[in-house]
Image (spheres, coloured by chain):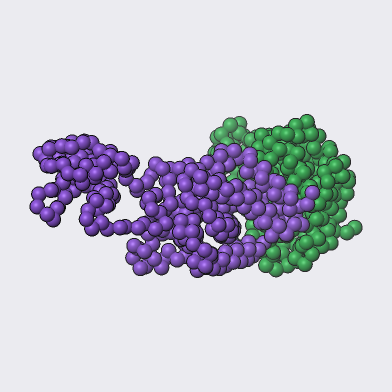
Chain colours: A purple, B green
Amino acid sequence: MSIFVSIIKKEVLHLVRDFRTLTAVLFMPVVLLLLFGFAISTEVNNVRIVAVVDMHTDQTRQIIEKFSSNPYFTFEGIVHAGEVDKLLRKGKADAAVIFDYGKAPHRHQIIVDASNTTMAQTSTAYIESVLNESSETPIVTNTLYNPQLKSAYLFVPGIMGMIFILICAIMTSVSIVSEKESGTMNLLLVSPIRPRTIILGKLVPYFLLSCIILTLVLVLSYTVLGIPFSASAFNVIWITLLYITLALSLGLLISTIAATQVSALLVSGVMFMIPIVLLSGMIFPVENMPAALQWLSCIVPARWYISAMRILMIQQLPLEHVLTEVSVLSGMTIAVLALAIKKFNAKN
Amino acid sequence: MNNAIEIRNITKRFGNLAALDNVTFSVPDGSVFGLIGPDGAGKTTLYSILATLLAPDSGRATVAGLDVIKDFKRLRSAIGYMPERFSLYPDLTVSENLHFFASLFGVRVEDNFDLIAPIFGQLAKFPHRMAAALSGGMKQKLALSCALIHRPKVLLLDEPTTGVDAVSRSEFWEMLATLKQKGITILVSTSYMDEAERCDRIALINKGHILDVDAPGKLVDKTGIDIYNASAREMYPLLQAIRNIDGVKDCYTFGATLHLATDKNFNLENAIGRLRQEGLTDARIYPAKGNIEDLFIKLAKE
């Protein structure tokens, strides 16, 4: 058995024996995807709506029918104008539509409970679109790439950007630093094997683990979350593999800086998690940030990866639209890997 | 007789602190050589240099005839290194640990098992136990087996008996004697002075300086000081009183008694008389045999 294989075998044993961590690492992506995909969403469902109608016409009947059959609305019935205020205050209804069929031009009124601004804006937009369709001069809004405005589409690339950094960078750095702490790293270094064999042997199992997670994430995204599957999935895979390599190199770099497992965790936590959540565009759009933060976000690898994933997975555009992202990610990978190997060798 | 380890004027600094200051000594082939000194004396730094983990700032060292800088690659196969804490993988089993370290050196456990068999003995009964679940003594035996599995010429043991019970410590020294018979040179460090007497030769090291190198028996004879034991019910007043007696160069606690290092001005009867006058009626002073610890305390003071 070659030295390389036995190092990998040993590393796999470490991983498998640490059953709790392994379970957490495999379940976390699934749970996060399902949470962000379904439970935590910026979509508004089941807007409870009431209508005030002075005089029924074909048009009002038609609109009310649309409200009743639309899955985003729950039509709560037709009420008197005086009751609207009471129903909204009691929280029995989220919005009311008051039809005006007096003199033309008709001016329908929407009254909406804005105690939750996100919900108020979204439901107003929904109602307007239903009313517009029925008006004489309808505005046709065409939402490209994500016609139903599903929030899963927004979050899947973000979660992928976060998970691979978490698993690769944090787990590899902790695993290398723990060998430094226990002194076994010294034993590996005094053996005749080359440092790069040690490093590679340590990275391969985490690379394989990341591939399993990538498969899990993609299968979930394309099936349960309903992201459209296309030929761009191939590009998604290899760019993700590039990103995983970058994350592994970052983990290696941290392990050369940190002396203890706790500091490795802290460094990777502060250096990666916070910027990823705040600066990568995962949740908050980069374009809305002050210029200084936008510049800062350029050094966050996840920003480029997430942006590439959105273009490839959601917009389904061909590769030439993500060339900037891919070249930035490649450049970062080469730089970080070179620095990490240099620092690792310098110590020995 | 050749020297298995040659250390010439090795200096290693960490910032302003000289961990090793112009250290020179040699270890004869096939001997058990003790490196004796307290914590922080520079023992581990010296081991790191010999094991090719650290480069010295200046000076030269060879192990098994190979230079620690120039020939470090070949040297690594010639030494077996056991660091201060028993560095094993706690989540791997006894057998997995042993096979892993064998594969690092490209050897098979079966080929060299005869060498470690006397040490491995009891461990062979539970090859599938996790290393984390072993007792201190068992861990020590496993770590030694792992360090020996590639048949090194020189064994570097850094404080192998720290944190191990007295019985296992004694067994361990018997194992070292067995290994010596098989022609392996052993450099062993310890902060337990009583273990020094089980070595062929020892080097006393303190604050990065080698104080003396010789066979333990000769070193004790060389002390040039007369050691007396002293005891009383009240030890602290006794210590203070003795320090004021003529001819007492030093007085320090030694186990349950006090040791007095004296020069020729010391007179036993006068001293006892003086203590009686000071009200220490139950004080006893009697000649004792000096040992490595007394020598160490004397040398460290100079």
In the picture, measured across the screen, residue B215 lies left or right of residue B263, that is: right
From what the image shows, is residue A246 above or below residue B255? below
Residue B75 percent coordinates (x, y): 79, 59
Residue A182: % across, % down = 63, 47
- Residue B184 falls left or right of residue A206: right
In the picture, the quarter occupied by the C terminus of chain A is: bottom right
Residue at the spot 40% in from the left edge and 54% down from the top edge = A146
Residue B35 in view (yes/no): no
In this view of the protein, which residue sits in the foreground, A211 or B10?
A: A211
Between B278 and A307, the residue placed more toward the observer is A307
Q: Is residue A292 left or right of residue A68?
A: right
Residue at screen point 49% across, 51% down? A228
Q: Say if residue A65 shows up in the picture.
A: yes
Q: Nearer the viewer, residue B77 or B107?
A: B107
**Which of the 4 image quarters holds residue A18?**
top right
Image quarter of residue A79: top left
Q: Quadrant of residue B24?
A: bottom right
Task: Give percent across and percent down for residue A107.
Answer: 14, 52
Question: Among all residues in the image, which is located at the extreme front?
Answer: A58
Camera-nearest residue between B257 and A144: A144
